[in-house]
Image (spheres, rainbow, N blue to C red):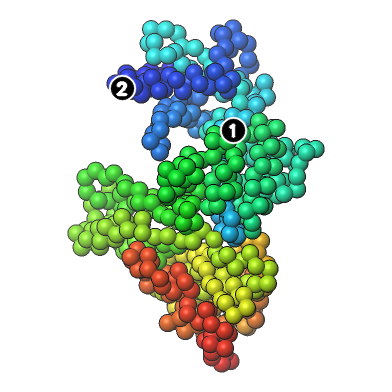
C-alpha cells in the first residue's frame, strides 16, 4: 500500500501521466492479461505475492513496469524464481548471421510474453493493486493470467513456448523451425537470405505458423521493399510503410540496439546524451561509457581510449563522486566532445554480396596486438570470386591490461589468446562456408611460443599456449608487421572522425585485397 500511495502522489502532480497510467492498467484487463478478483478469491489462496508497479519513459512512450525484484522482508519474487536455461541463440550470433547475405528481414512478436498463460496455481504470486487514482477507495486486487514483463523466468518460458509451438505443429516447416531457433533473440527476428523469393516465402510461412499459436509477428522491415510490399499495413513497420509509399527516404529500424538504415542497408550509431548534474565524477564517466552500445566492437579504437583514461583516473581519484582532477578532466572532456560524431559512423549490414556466390572462396583473418595499456583482436572476411577480392569487417574485441604489470611478450600472448577465442566464437556462429581461418600476430616471440610445446614453459605462458593450441592449430598462425596490423588501432586508438573515413580498420589491411604473393613474409622462427 505504501508503494501504491507513493505512485499516486507522483501521478497527482501530472494529470496527463495519471490518465496514461490508468489506461495502461485497464488495457491489461481488457486484453485478459490481468483480471480483477474479489477479496474472497484473494484470501482463498494459500500463498500470494503483490508486485509493485511504476511508470517509465522509453523511446518517447510512457510504460507501466512491474518490479518483480522489489524486496519485502529481505526477499523478492525474482529471488525465488529460476531463470531457466538459455534456449535461444546469443544476441551476438543473431547479429553475425544477420549480416551474412544480401536480403535482410526483421520482425517483432507483439507482446510475446503476454501470449503465454500462467498455471492457475502460479497466478496468486503475481498480483497487484490499483484503484483508478481514487485515494479514498479500497484498492482493487488484480491477478496476472499471463507472463508479465519483469519476472526472471519470462524470457525462458516464452522462448520455450515459441520453439515448442513451431517444432510440434503438424504444419511446421523446417525452414521456419530453423529460423525460430537460430534467428530469434527473444521476440525479435533478424535474418538474412540469399534471394528476395526466399525472404518473401519465409515471411509468409512464418506469419501463418506463428499466428496459429497466437504469436502475432509484425513490424516487418527489409532492405528490399518488394519483400514486404504485399503485407498488410498493420504487419509492416511504420518507417518501411512510409518508405514504400515514398513518404520517407531513409527508414530506420532498431535492431538489437543498433540502428539499421534499411534503404542504405547500413548500421548506424546513435549519440545518447547523458544528463549530468554538478562536477564530472567517476560515476558520470561510467554512465557515459555504459551508454556506448557496440556489440560488434566496431568503435573499439575510440572507446578503448576512454577506458585507458579511466585506468589513469583511478590512480588519482579515490571515490565515485570525487570531482576529476583538472588536467585529466580536460582529457575526458576532449573525448566526450567527440561523441556527437557517432552519427557519422556506418557499418555495412551485409559483409559482402559476394557471399551469395557459391563459387566464392571465403576465408577468415584474425589480427592480434597488445600494448602496455590494452590488447585485443579484430576479424575480417576475405571473399575471393575469380579475380575480385572483397574484405569485410566482422567483429573486434578488446581488454584492458591487468594492473599488475606484465612483460610485452606476455601481453602479446594474451592478445593472441583473445584472437583465438574470437576465431572460435565466429566459427561456431557463422554459417558461411569458411575455407580456412588465418591468424596474424606481430610478435615473433608469441609465434615461437605457439609453435612450441606448452609444457616447456611456466604456468602463465604454458596454460595460454595450451589453450590457444586447443582452439586453433599452430599452422594457422602467421606474422604481420605492425604497419599492416589493423589490431594496432585498438591499442593506439582512433577518433570517430578517423573511423568514419575509409581506413585499414574498416576495410582491412591493403595486403588482404591482394593475392597471397603480396602478403607479409614470415620471418624465420627458431
Report if residue 152 is visible in the image. no
Residue 453 location, x and y as percent? 65, 81
Residue 62 location, x and y as percent? 40, 30
User: Seen in the image, is 500 located left or right of residue 281?
Assistant: right
The quarter holding residue 344 reads: bottom left
Residue 105 location, x and y as percent? 58, 49
Residue indicated by mark 1: 113
- Which residue is pictured at 57% across the width and 21% down the height? 31
Q: Is residue 526 above or below residue 320?
A: below
- Which residue is pictured at 49% across the width and 52% down the height? 262
Q: Secondary structure at mark 2?
A: loop
Quadrant where the N terminus sits is top left
Of the numbered discs in the image, which one, if any, rests on residue 14? 2
Residue 70 location, x and y as percent? 47, 30
Quadrant where the C terminus sits is bottom right
Report if residue 22 is visible in the image. yes
Q: Is residue 459 above or below residue 28?
A: below
The quarter holding residue 155 reads: top right
- Which residue is pictured at 65% across the width and 67% down the height? 357
Amino acid at each position: 500500500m505504501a508503494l501504491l500511495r507513493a505512485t499516486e502522489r507522483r501521478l497527482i502532480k501530472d494529470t496527463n501521466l495519471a490518465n496514461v497510467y490508468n489506461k495502461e492498467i485497464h488495457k491489461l484487463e481488457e486484453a485478459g492479461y490481468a483480471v480483477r478478483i474479489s477479496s474472497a478469491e484473494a484470501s482463498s489462496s494459500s500463498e500470494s505475492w503483490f508486485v509493485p508497479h511504476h511508470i517509465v519513459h522509453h523511446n518517447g512512450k510512457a510504460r507501466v513496469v512491474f518490479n518483480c525484484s522489489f524486496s519485502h522482508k529481505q526477499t523478492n519474487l525474482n529471488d525465488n524464481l529460476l531463470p531457466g536455461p538459455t534456449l535461444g541463440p546469443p544476441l551476438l550470433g543473431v547479429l553475425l548471421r544477420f549480416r551474412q547475405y544480401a536480403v535482410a528481414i526483421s520482425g517483432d512478436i507483439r507482446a510475446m510474453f503476454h501470449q503465454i498463460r500462467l498455471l492457475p496455481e502460479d497466478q496468486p504470486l503475481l498480483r497487484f493493486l490499483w484503484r483508478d487514482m481514487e485515494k479514498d477507495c479500497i484498492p482493487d486486487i488484480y491477478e496476472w493470467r499471463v507472463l508479465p514483463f519483469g519476472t526472471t523466468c519470462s524470457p525462458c518460458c516464452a522462448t520455450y513456448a515459441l520453439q515448442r509451438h513451431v517444432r510440434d505443429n503438424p504444419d511446421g516447416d523446417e525452414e521456419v523451425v530453423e529460423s525460430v531457433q537460430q534467428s530469434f533473440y527473444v521476440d525479435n527476428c533478424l535474418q538474412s537470405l540469399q534471394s528476395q523469393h526466399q525472404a518473401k516465402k519465409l515471411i509468409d510461412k512464418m506469419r501463418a505458423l506463428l499466428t496459429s499459436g497466437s504469436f502475432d509477428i509484425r513490424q516487418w522491415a527489409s532492405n528490399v521493399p518488394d519483400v514486404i510490399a504485399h503485407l498488410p499495413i498493420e504487419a509492416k513497420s511504420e518507417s518501411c510503410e512510409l518508405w514504400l509509399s515514398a513518404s520517407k527516404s531513409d527508414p530506420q529500424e532498431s535492431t538489437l540496439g543498433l540502428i539499421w538504415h534499411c534503404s542504405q542497408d547500413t548500421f548506424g550509431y546513435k549519440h545518447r546524451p547523458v544528463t549530468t548534474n554538478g562536477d564530472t565524477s567517476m560515476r558520470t564517466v561510467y554512465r557515459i561509457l555504459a551508454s556506448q552500445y557496440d556489440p560488434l566492437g566496431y568503435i573499439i579504437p575510440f572507446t578503448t581510449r576512454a577506458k585507458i583514461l579511466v585506468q589513469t583516473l583511478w590512480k588519482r581519484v579515490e571515490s565515485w563522486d570525487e570531482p576529476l582532477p583538472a588536467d585529466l578532466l580536460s582529457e575526458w572532456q576532449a573525448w566526450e566532445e567527440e561523441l556527437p560524431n557517432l552519427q557519422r559512423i556506418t557499418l555495412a549490414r551485409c559483409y559482402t554480396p559476394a557471399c551469395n556466390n557459391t563459387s566464392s572462396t571465403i576465408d577468415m583473418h584474425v589480427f592480434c596486438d597488445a600494448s602496455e595499456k590494452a590488447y585485443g583482436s579484430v576479424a575480417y572476411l576475405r571473399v575471393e570470386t575469380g579475380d575480385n577480392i572483397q574484405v569485410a569487417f566482422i567483429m573486434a574485441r578488446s581488454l584492458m591490461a591487468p594492473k599488475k604489470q606484465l612483460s610485452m611478450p606476455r601481453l602479446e600472448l594474451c592478445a593472441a589468446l583473445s584472437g583465438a577465442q574470437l576465431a572460435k566464437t565466429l566459427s561456431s556462429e557463422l554459417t558461411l562456408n569458411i575455407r580456412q581461418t588465418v591468424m596474424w600476430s606481430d610478435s615473433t616471440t608469441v609465434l615461437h611460443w605457439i609453435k612450441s610445446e606448452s609444457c616447456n614453459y611456466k604456468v602463465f605462458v604454458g596454460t595460454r599456449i595450451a589453450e590457444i593450441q586447443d582452439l586453433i592449430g599452430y599452422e594457422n598462425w602467421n606474422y604481420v608487421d605492425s604497419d599492416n596490423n589493423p589490431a594496432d588501432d585498438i591499442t593506439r586508438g582512433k577518433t570517430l572522425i578517423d573511423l568514419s573515413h575509409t581506413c585499414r580498420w574498416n576495410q582491412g589491411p591493403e595486403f588482404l585485397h591482394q593475392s597471397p604473393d603480396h602478403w607479409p613474409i614470415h620471418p624465420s622462427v627458431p
